[in-house]
Amino acid sequence: MGNNMWTTPEHEKYRMKIREFAEREIAPITQKTDREQFFPDELLPKLNEMGLLGMQVDKKYGGTYTDTLTYIIAVEEISRVCGSTGITIAAHNSLGTYPIYKFGTEKQKRKYLPEITTGGKLAAFGLTEPEAGSDAGGTKTFAAKVKDGYKVNGTKCWITCAGISKTVVFTAKTSREMGTKGISSFIVTHGTPGFSSGKKENKLGLRGSDTRFLHFDDVFIPEEDRLGEEGQGFKQFMITLDGGRVSIGAMALGIAQGAYDIAIKYATKRQQFGQPIGKFQSVGFKLADMATQLQASRHLVYHAALLKDKENVRYSKESAMAKLHASETGYFCTYAAIGILGAEGYGDKYPVERMFRDAKLCEIGEGTSEIQRLVISRIILKEAEKSTSTFGFPKE
């Protein structure tokens, strides 16, 4: 992993620090949290102590601000041993805290960020709704203007950290006539009258992460807790999702790396017909494909992470490419790992079956693979329309 053009020796030193922490503190409890479907309360202070809850926030607001590549490495290494913890960190940093840091007023930043960075509390992001998944602009949650604020009614679904967060950034329509330009963003905290979370979802994978509905029943939101101006919500969450997709790519990359590490070690130790199974071409070729896809995904994810930190550089195409390739690599590598381990991979003696279940979410969350292809195709077609090249075309 150190053999790439993106990371510095400091990045790789940090990687090993997070890997050691993850293997010591998280790996021993992953099977239990998956089986019993809970996020362990005792883990949160440890994540906080490692500085993993404020990585997208400046130190003056309580954060531990790092460059995006360092943050991505942290998500990758945590996800290598536990996808549930990986998505919790990714959702909290990229979706929960980032919009407040990026779009909030100075007062909002000082009010909310310290508690959800070094304060040990989590944040969530309420975007998806029962009728607004891939069509995120089709939100039905409505914020009606009232004296000094808004009265909000609606429902959000499949929200990571919904039941264990303190603060939630969410979107709602402030105008039913203006389409996506009528969407605004707000901040709400648990304990606000009328605001509640539903029962924990029973999921295929990432069962150690907290995923629930959020319900708004005549919830009063003061005007000072609107994030930015009215009508800026759609633009804000599109910017937020660009960064979020890079973190999901890192999560998928970590899950894939974990499955590969187990599979290749197993292939060197498992003996059949008098030799390690890795020496059989059918197994060796699988490992070669896994290693190649991992390397390609890592380059895409790291490249997108570096672009995120550049001023005034659009990276929507690169973030979509990173998320698309890495998430499909995650599924490919975990599936291949089960095949290499055979019956042992099908049971829970090894974590590859859990990794296989966890990886599938990466192809769905923060935009399905189909949505990523749609984003990429729209951008590359626009780029082609602007091109003045006539290469390969006959002279008229």
Image (spheres, helix red, strand yellow):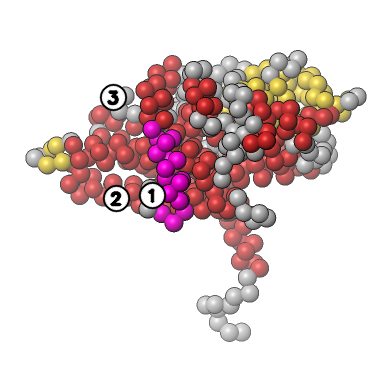
Image quarter of residue 193: top right
Amino acid at pointer 3: Lys
Residue 322 is covered by the magenta coloring: no
Amino acid at pointer 2: Ala
- Mark 2, residue position: 288
Mark nearest the camera among 1 and 2 is: 1
Measure how far apart labels 3 and 1 are at the Cα level.
Answer: 30 Å
Q: Nearer the viewer, residue 4 or 11?
A: 11
Q: Earlier in the sequence, mark 3 or mark 1?
A: 1
Element marked by disc 1:
loop
Residue at figure coordinates x 64%, y 18% from the top left: 197
Which range of residues does the magenta coloring cover?
4-20
Image quarter of residue 360: top left
Residue 126 placement (x, y as % from top left): 66, 30
Image quarter of residue 59: top right
> In this rendering, would 219 be left or right of 53?
right
Question: Do the residues bearing badges 1 and 2 touch, measured as CB atoms within 8 Å?
Answer: no
Element marked by disc 3:
loop
Measure how far apart labels 2 and 3 are at the Cα level.
Answer: 24 Å
Q: Nearer the viewer, residue 152 or 43?
A: 43
Residue at figure coordinates x 59%, y 60% from the top left: 380
- Mark 3, residue position: 349
Element marked by disc 2:
helix
> In this rendering, would 88 be left or right of 277?
right
